[in-house]
Amino acid sequence: MKFRRLIAAILTAILFAGIVGTVDAQDEPPPESERGGYLAAIAGCAYCHSPADGLAFSGGSFSQNGVAYVAPNLTPSDSGLDGWSSEDIAIAITTGVRPDGSQLSPVMPYLYFNNLADSDVDALVAYLQGLAPVEDGPPLVADQAEGIMPPTPQRQMGIAAPDPTNSVAYGGYLIDAVAACGACHTPVQANGLPDPDLYLAGGTAFSGEWGTVYAGNLTPQPT
């Protein structure tokens, strides 16, 4: 089920990429919520926040490095984001801090999302707020705090995404800020922060009905 959702997320990203590419060719920027859907697909938000047999974004659960996590309902429902302001959602995405001041588990990659362009944060928020409310799903409760909790970052503001015509710079932005590849593929130090010396070197274990799989080494290392 998890693999099918992952494949669906990838196909959705490809579909959105095609839509956005067509719109960009006409020099007309896509609507904000459409851009947000494209970014949510690349980031794989539905992969964690959807049940194996249920509605997307209504909440899910998974295990990483032997620790079980609950991914809450992200729809604007009573058990989800209803009552959260746009700023509340933006702060949670980029700093991992809820409106009540509690810290999200770093399994939600806010350390990476903190590098998102302001306009892309706004687009993600608009997309989530436009989802149909779903009431069945894990409520917004505190995550399990087993594992290493890094210091929460200060929210970065004034960020602009690189020019998409600069494929290297824009690809790096998608990898580091949007897809947050390092959240799975970069090992974590004792302080809970990504190890810069092992950038994208792999090793994180994921367990589910398929067994246990490991994030691979994404660097151009021979093996």
Image (cartoon, rainbow, N blue to C red):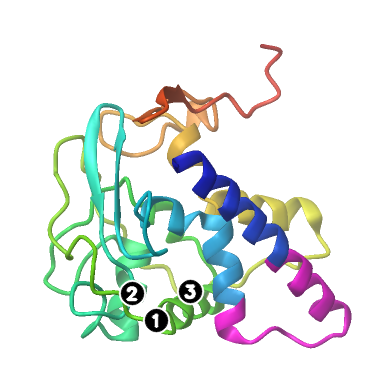
Return the residue at label 1: 132
Q: Callout 1, which amino acid? A: Ala
Image spot of residue 25 (x, y percent): 88, 78
Alpha-carbon neighbours of circle 3 within 10 Å: few (<14), some, or many (≥20)? many
Return the residue at label 2: 75
Quick check: marks 2 and 1 in contact, CB under 8 Å? yes
Residue 23: in magenta span: yes
Q: What stretch is highlighted in magenta?
A: 16-34
Alpha-carbon neighbours of circle 2 within 10 Å: few (<14), some, or many (≥20)? many
Identity of the residue furthest to the front in this view: 53
Between disc 3 and disc 2, the foreground one is 2
Between disc 3 and disc 1, the foreground one is 1
Image spot of residue 83 (x, y percent): 21, 85
Q: Callout 3, which amino acid? A: Leu
Distance of mark 3 from mark 2, alpha carbons? Answer: 12 Å
Return the residue at label 3: 124
The local secondary structure at tag 2 comes to: loop
Residue ID at (41%, 29%): 187
Q: In which quarter of the image is the N terminus?
A: top left
Counting residues from the start of the chain, the first of labels 3 and 2 encountered is 2
Image spot of residue 110 (x, y percent): 37, 56
The local secondary structure at tag 1 comes to: loop
Q: In this view, does 86 lie to the left or right of 20?
A: left
Counting residues from the start of the chain, the first of labels 3 and 1 encountered is 3
Counting residues from the start of the chain, the first of labels 2 and 1 encountered is 2
Residue 167: in magenta span: no
Distance of mark 3 from mark 1, alpha carbons? Answer: 15 Å
